[in-house]
């Protein structure tokens, strides 16, 4: 009897499950864990890591009907290759999800640089590093919009679909050139969307700088330096609050564009020559 069949029989008698089920669980867990490694969740670093691990494990168990029907293998190199392929696919999907939230952080970073908020830093709840106040607010705002728009349901649906269209153990046999090109286009879309979100505030701050410069030329005795920073900070906060609904609409359009790219990724085109 082959070694893998003996191991599967022993495992089935001891815990009631076979070796193919365990290997399928490991492959699905690698894909799910890779996806949620880029997820941005508020809270302490240890709490976030523990929450990601528990949620990935729970979601893997919930996706049991979609687990692949694998033939048990005793080759550790082949199994390691499968796990690495699944982790790479999960990381790719997680990167696409993270890109849907980075546009707001990038826009707030541009606004903070022009408004003078770069002098004030706060603790990023995700990385525990010093970050600007406005980028942290933008990240939290993006997280709230992410769940308010129901994008989490789209991600879980795409993950379940990928287990059917791209079964674990067969990812390397698929041609993913077209979805890969769409993923690359998302990087440029992040910068374009960030500029669109920050442009109204940056334009008004530029007008304020020109006005203060003109007043300084008219009366050189005015101490406008002490007025410029508070005025720019107050104006930027006011415009951000006014433009928040419009920012939410732009973010929604960008997020659903990312979800469409994610659907293209989990529905790869058939190989050339296949009918």
Image (spheres, rainbow, N blue to C red):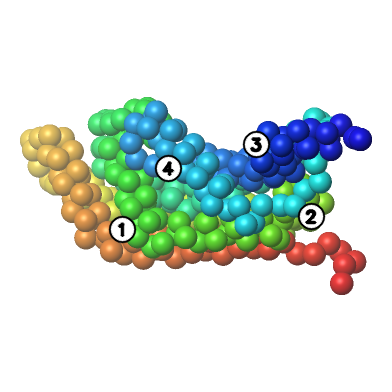
Checking the image for residue 15, the label placed there is: 3
Label 3 near label 1: C-beta < 8 Å? no
Left or right: 119 as drawn, with respect to 67? left
**Residue 76, position in %: x, y?**
80, 30
Q: What separation in Å lies between label 4 and label 2 (alpha carbons)?
A: 29 Å
Q: Residue 49 appears in which quarter of the rendering?
A: top left
Query: Which mark is nearer the camera, 1 or 2?
Result: 2
Split into 4 quadrants, where in the image is the N terminus?
top right
Which mark sits nearer the N-terminus, 3 or 2?
A: 3
Q: Which residue is mark 4?
A: 40
Q: Which residue is mark 1?
A: 200
SS for tag 4?
loop
Q: Earlier in the sequence, mark 4 or mark 2?
A: 4
- For residue 51, which quarter of the picture? top left
Q: CA distance from mark 1 to mark 4?
A: 27 Å
Pointers 3 and 2 in contact (C-beta within 8 Å): no
Whole-percent x, y for residue 212 in the image: 17, 46
């Amino acid at each position: 009897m082959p070694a893998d069949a003996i191991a599967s029989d022993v495992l089935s008698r001891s815990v009631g499950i076979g070796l193919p089920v365990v290997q399928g669980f490991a492959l699905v867990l690698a894909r799910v864990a890779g996806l949620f490694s880029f997820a941005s969740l508020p809270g302490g670093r240890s709490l976030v890591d523990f929450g990601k691990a528990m949620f990935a494990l729970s979601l893997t168990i919930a996706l049991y009907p979609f687990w692949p029907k694998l033939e048990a293998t005793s080759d550790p190199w082949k199994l390691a290759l499968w796990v690495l392929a699944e982790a790479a696919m999960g990381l790719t999907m997680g990167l696409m999800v993270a890109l849907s939230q980075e546009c707001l952080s990038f826009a707030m970073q541009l606004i903070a640089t022009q408004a003078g908020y770069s002098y004030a830093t706060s603790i990023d709840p995700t990385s525990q590093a010093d970050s600007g106040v406005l980028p942290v607010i933008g990240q939290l705002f993006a997280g709230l919009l992410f769940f308010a728009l129901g994008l989490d349901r789209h991600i879980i649906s795409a993950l379940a679909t990928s287990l059917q269209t791209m079964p674990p153990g067969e990812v390397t046999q698929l041609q993913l050139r077209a979805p890969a090109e769409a993923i690359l286009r998302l990087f440029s879309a992040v910068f374009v969307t960030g500029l669109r979100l920050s442009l109204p505030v940056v334009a008004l701050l530029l007008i304020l700088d020109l006005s203060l410069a003109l007043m300084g030329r008219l009366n050189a005795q005015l101490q406008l330096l002490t007025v410029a920073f508070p005025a720019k900070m107050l104006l930027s906060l006011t415009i951000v609050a006014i433009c928040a609904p419009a920012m939410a609409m732009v973010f929604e359009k960008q997020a659903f564009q990312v979800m469409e790219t994610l659907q293209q990724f989990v529905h790869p085109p058939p190989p050339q020559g296949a009918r």
